[in-house]
Image (cartoon, grey):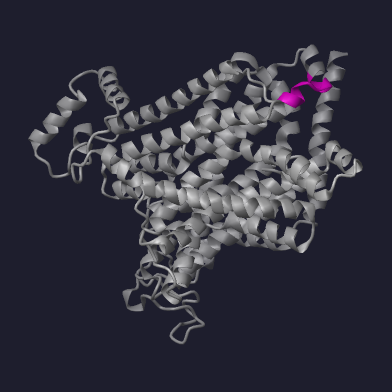
Amino acid sequence: MAEESTQLVVTTGASIWRLRLIAVASGLRRAPKIPTAVLGVLMVFALFGPWIAPHNPVAVDLANSFSPPAWHAEGTVSNLLGTDKLGRDILSRLIRGARVSLALSLAIIGIGGGAGVILGLISGYSGKMVDTVIQRGVEVILAMPTILVALVFVFSVGRSFESVMLILSPFVAARFTRIVRGETLSVRERDFVAIAQVIGTPTWMILLKHVLPNVFNTVIVLATLEVGHLILLESSLSFLGVGVPPPLPAWGLMVADGREFISSAYWIALFPGLAILLAVLSVNLFGDWLRDILDPRRRQL
Amino acid sequence: MLRYIGLRFFQALLGLWFIATLVFVLSRSIGDPAEIFTARNSGVDAREIMAQKLGLDKPLYHQYALYMGQLVRGNLGKSVRNGIPVTQILAERLPATFILGLIALIFAVAVSIPLGVLGAVYRDSPIDWIAKVIAFLGQSMPPFWLGIMLIILFAVVWGIVPPAGKLGPTSYILPAFTLGWAVMAGMVRLVRSSMLDVLDSDYVTMARAKGLAEIVVVSKHGLRNALIPVITYSSLILGAFMNGSVVVEQVFAWPGIGTVAVQSVVSRDFPVIQGVVIVFGGFFILINFFVDILYAVIDPRIKYTAQ
């Protein structure tokens, strides 16, 4: 009897996953075309950038510095979007920069989001003291100015991929914790959780098999929207000089490089900014669409 | 209510303590503290005096107590670059940051509330479409890039406004717009979606059924309730402001706190950056505290006790 119930409940969990997969698969055909395409191109750039980029993104060529984009009279097709003050090809740097931005955002979502989901599940499910402690911690983190804290942290430990990742993860974790906790609170009251408790399913199993599948939609939507947020945050840090260190071409850093030359070589600052705008806009539009099909209640986020 | 205020106050103190401790831990973990608190080429004597002052010969908890004691007394040390007390630097720079933030806030509110409301009332009309485009573009555009593009257009090409710095009233336009724009987008979205929710509710239908004029329904029954989520998310909005002002000040060479923060990072002026983080963080936490209380006063449904 006990085994049968377990079987039944587990099947419910599994069928949720199957239904979700079907929903996504059938929905993906109706996905907004342009944002999806832009994201696809970005992924390709991030994965295969070194084989696609026409030039080495960090190769200095002083004889060829400040070359304008191809549509200017002095521009060349070889440097389609022009070159910067060191003669490095802007287009190749943009393509390489896609990997920096995406890898950093995904790493932060993985670490911060993962921790946030676990803490949110525990906080929402256990209630009482544990919940209070976790929620107070979340509030403290959310009440801190992100950029300033990141500024002083990266300044102290040095500029690196890891230090940016380390300092931004808690902020992402806090946002995930808060929202996953809210969802868990309502899932906890559902009958299938009560049944699982009655038949003595261990708590971690209940969280993993019964609660997590039911908060997963929210997590996916939140993760997508956070990618856009993180690309912006990371590029702001790079712009301020505390992001990923040069010569790696981070988009924010490229805009900062172009700042001195806005009256003579606008293209150095223009294109990386456009790349950020396009990437974040696509992620946001895609995330918005995803929320409409997966999690329509959360329109305000 | 008093209990609620007390709890929030305790949380605010906890947040302040956390920031101060983080700064302490960082200052003790990145190398010789005597060195980071003195000018780069100062002699051994200066470093020894600083070591004495920071209590580096004493155990760590003693150093921590010394540090906290100085903080509580409002002593943030002196800049290693020019020897000016950090509190004096901050006091000089704070007004510029504050005024810029205020103008940007007024601009953001003045645009986002009408636009969000009209977007919701005339759903799928051209004005709704404009509201949506502004919301999406604003949330996706890096503010530092927008600032640079505005400088190119309005200062370099057309020469209408000064490209940077605080030089007369026209120099406020570009930085205030850039800062306001980033915040405005989120607010348009928030007002629009919560207005849509409210307009769907029973009491709005009831008000319409009573025969109230649409303008009364929208402004009195609709907008008032639609603004509650704006207050709920005001800490996020405030966060966007803080982050934005550091970046925007940097772009426009605005003589405010954000510029000081970035400059002190570049010149490795630890006492100054420590002061900026503590004061800015404290300000942020303080405003969050007041907003929480305001929120409880406005919305009687909020429970005053912790769950």
Q: Which residues fall within the magenta stretch? A: A185-193
Q: In this view, does A279 lie to the left or right of A204?
A: left
Q: In which quarter of the image is the C terminus of chain B?
A: top right
Q: In x, y percent, where is residue B305? A: 63, 17
Residue A274, image quadrant = bottom right
The question of residue A192 being in magenta is answered with yes
Q: Quadrant of the N terminus of chain B?
A: top right
Q: Which of A210 and B45 is in front in this view?
A: B45
Residue A9 vs A300, above or below: the answer is: above
Q: In x, y percent, where is residue B263? A: 31, 50
Q: In this view, does B8 lie to the left or right of A157?
A: right
Residue A145 vs A292, above or below: the answer is: above
Q: In x, y percent, where is residue A139? A: 54, 29
Principal secondary structure, stretch drawn in magenta: helix
Q: In x, y percent, where is residue B121? A: 78, 52
Residue B54, image quadrant = top left
Residue ID at (45%, 64%): B148
Q: Would residue A12 be seen by someone viewing this image from the given angle?
A: yes
Residue ID at (78%, 37%): A17
Q: Would residue B271 be seen by someone viewing this image from the given angle?
A: no
